[in-house]
Image: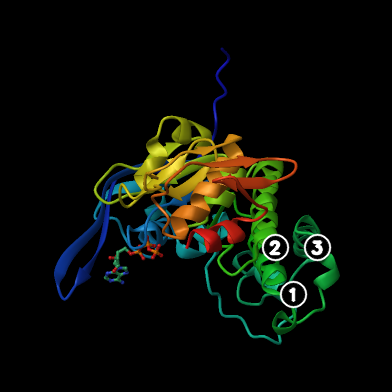
Amino acid sequence: MERIQKHIALSGKELALGYFHQKVKKEILSDLDFALLSGELTCLLGPNGVGKSTLIKAILGQIQPWKGSIQLDNQSISNFSLEELAKRIAVVLTDPVFPGNMTVGQLVALGRTPHTGWSGKLNSDDREIVEKALSDTNISYLREERLSEISDGQRQKAMIARALAQDGQVMILDEPTAHLDLINRFETMNLLRDIAHGQHKAILVVTHDLDIAIETADRFWLLNCGTPLIHGKPEDLILSGKINQLLPSDKYRFSLSRGKMEVENQKLGFDIEGPLELVFWVEKALVKAGIQGLDSGVSVSKEPFLIRYKDQDFSTLEELVIFLK
Ligand SMILES: Nc1ncnc2c1ncn2[C@@H]1O[C@H](COP(=O)(O)OP(=O)(O)OP(=O)(O)O)[C@@H](O)[C@H]1O
């Protein structure tokens, strides 16, 4: 099989990261290795407080590793000034503060700041890059709109356009879908994947949005307390069961057939017969209603949808639950 050699844009080796809290050393991440590949959308997932933002801060040069090193294009990031890093790594943080009266065009133009210096004066190349960033994110029509007068989804696209205008090889986004509805969450992540693939950028997204990440990411990094970073294609991590690393307890499980986390259902004291996909939802409704034991089984059929219990037919689960209670 031909092996495709991927370009490692950013890597970390044997990293130890942490903080001093009242002069006491508090190590958050130990012995951490990672490699962020160009041309891919990578999602970093892990529970609250595990150290995802801490890792991002280290990549951005805001905190220094206690041990190990981070390499950007095979050079230690400690060799780069913060200005140089800003030219190469664009970042989109969760709750950025920009004046509401700033226009989308002005925000995206700010992405050129690391290249223009203090003057902020754009030359024709800069203007072209800003226009391209607006058009790549499909928001050219918003150029003159004020940030306070556009939707959360549009503002997130504008933030991504600003990061694109920065024209770095690496883009890092901290929870870019946090305030968005389902469709905008998909759109944002699909846009990021298109950018990673089309412009060969290495994109790292910190997210708690497992469903959308499974649909869109090329690679997962799973971070958990005290264990090495697990990485791989989402589908490989699901099939190998490594995805369960994200689960806090046995109460939850990752359903292979449904592709998402589920609460482990208590075992019912009766049978439900019928097509599997219908049985699943009948079981869910009965468990939620606290119905665990019945005198006889339940059957469910499709077309017409009917639930039968003791010779009686119900056309909705609501009717069945009312009857059983
Ligand atoms: N400036 C700081 N000084 C001391 N401890 C800190 C500091 N910032 C974060 N921490 C601690 O580091 C740990 C990791 O925090 P971090 O914000 O990196 O987690 P996270 O994985 O990004 O969490 P979340 O998913 O909630 O955003 C937490 O225990 C936090 O309290």
Residue depicted at 24% across the width and 48% down the height: 226
Whether the residues at callouts 1 and 3 have beta carbons within 8 Å, the answer is no
- Numbered disc 2: secondary structure: helix
Residue wearing tag 1: 104
Write down the residue under mark 3.
Answer: 131
Which secondary structure, mark 3?
A: helix
How far separated are the C-alphas under marks 2 and 1?
A: 9 Å
**SS for tag 1?**
helix
Residue wearing tag 2? 161
Residue 70, given in percent of the width and then of the height, sits at 38, 48
- What residue is drawn where x is 47% and y is 35%? 238
Q: Residue furthest front?
A: 311
The local crowd at label 2, few if under 14, some if 14 to 19, many if 20 or more residues have their Cα within 10 Å, is: many
Foreground tag (1 vs 3) = 1
Ligand 1, by image quadrant, is bottom left
The image quadrant that residue 71 belongs to is top left
Amino acid at dot 2: Ala
Relative to the observer, which residue lies in front, 225 or 136?
225
Q: Earlier in the sequence, mark 3 or mark 2?
A: 3
Give residue 245's quadrant in the image: top left
Residue under the image location 38 percent in, 44 percent down: 269
Q: Please rate how many residues cluster around mark 1, counting C-alpha atoms within 10 Å: few if below 14, some from 14 to 19, many from 20.
A: many
Whole-percent x, y for residue 93 in the image? 52, 67
Looking at the rendered structure, the kind of residue marked 1 is: Val
Q: In the rendered image, is residue 206 in sight? A: no
